[in-house]
Image (cartoon, helix red, strand yellow):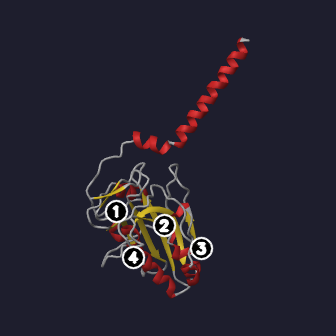
Amino acid sequence: MKNYKRGRLARKILVVISILIGIIYLNRVAIVQKIVSLGTQSPIVNIDKKTNQQSDNVQLANLDYNGQSVVTVNDNQPTFTNDELQLKGSGWQKLSNLDWLGRPQVANALLNKKLMPPAQKYKARERLTIKTPGHHAIKTGNNQTDWLYNRSHLIGYQFTGLNNESKNLVTGTRQLNADSRKNAQSMVTFETEISDYLKRSDKNYVRYQVTPVYRNVELVPRGVHMMAQSLGSDNVKFNVYIFNAQDGWVINYLNGEGNRK
């Protein structure tokens, strides 16, 4: 009888532990965000020393937006190795797995015109349905494009036709994604430079890397690190960091909430 009662008690304890583990797992983001220090903030700088990618991105994560949307990294020189700039086979793209918080990570590609979707397919692009980490539908005006956030592709749709893929989409401000203001630079500025080059010839290739940069356990990236190098030439060559900010708005990168200043 005692052994039966002990066994029954043990089963109850096991059920309770299993339930607690389940609750902790489902709420892991909120729990970790509350207990992890979000670190100190540092002034904006132009990173001009050649360091490894991980070190660069740690430094970039600690930069604060001060009105300058784009800063160069490593004096605008890409840091691909010679091996990474070799043409092996045809074009390709590789997406990293989501991290334990469900956030997209680095995306790599060797871009070529043959990978690009036909113009008619581009016009008929399906509506994005994936909810990216930290995304909120926040209106900033009355026009159809007046939203605080876009779901921003890491490898742009125009390059490979990849659309509704959680590994390739982050929560990005309109200003990061496609700033339409005169003389403004955003992701689309550099994507257009690549796209124009690729369209000139089937023989043109561009090694490309895009990394969303997060500060600790925040769900919304502080910015996007973009690096590109055309193979066999310097027609396309850049290494830049674009802040995920929106003038006139305060963004809570922890959960994506935004408010006007």
Which residue type does callout 4 highlight? Thr
Rounded to the nearest whole Å, what is the CA distance between mark 2 and mark 3? Answer: 23 Å
Tell whether label 3 touches label 1 (CB within 8 Å).
Answer: no
Q: Gap between marks 1 and 2, in whole Å?
A: 16 Å
Residue located beneath label 4 in the image: 189
Q: Label 2 crowding class (10 Å Cα cut-off): few <14, some 14-19, many 20+? A: many
Pointer 3: what residue? Answer: 88
Q: Which is closer to the viewer, label 4 or label 3?
A: 4
Secondary structure under tag 3 reads: loop
Front disc: 2 or 3: 2
Q: Which residue is mark 1?
A: 245
Nearer the N terminus, badge 1 or badge 3?
3
Q: Earlier in the sequence, mark 2 or mark 4?
A: 2
* Residue in the foreground of this view, choosing between 168 and 88: 168
The single residue placed furthest to the top in the displayed view is 2
- Sequence-wise, the earlier of marks 4 and 3 is 3
Rendered image: mark on residue 154: 2
Query: Would you identify the image quadrant in which residue 115 lies?
Result: bottom right
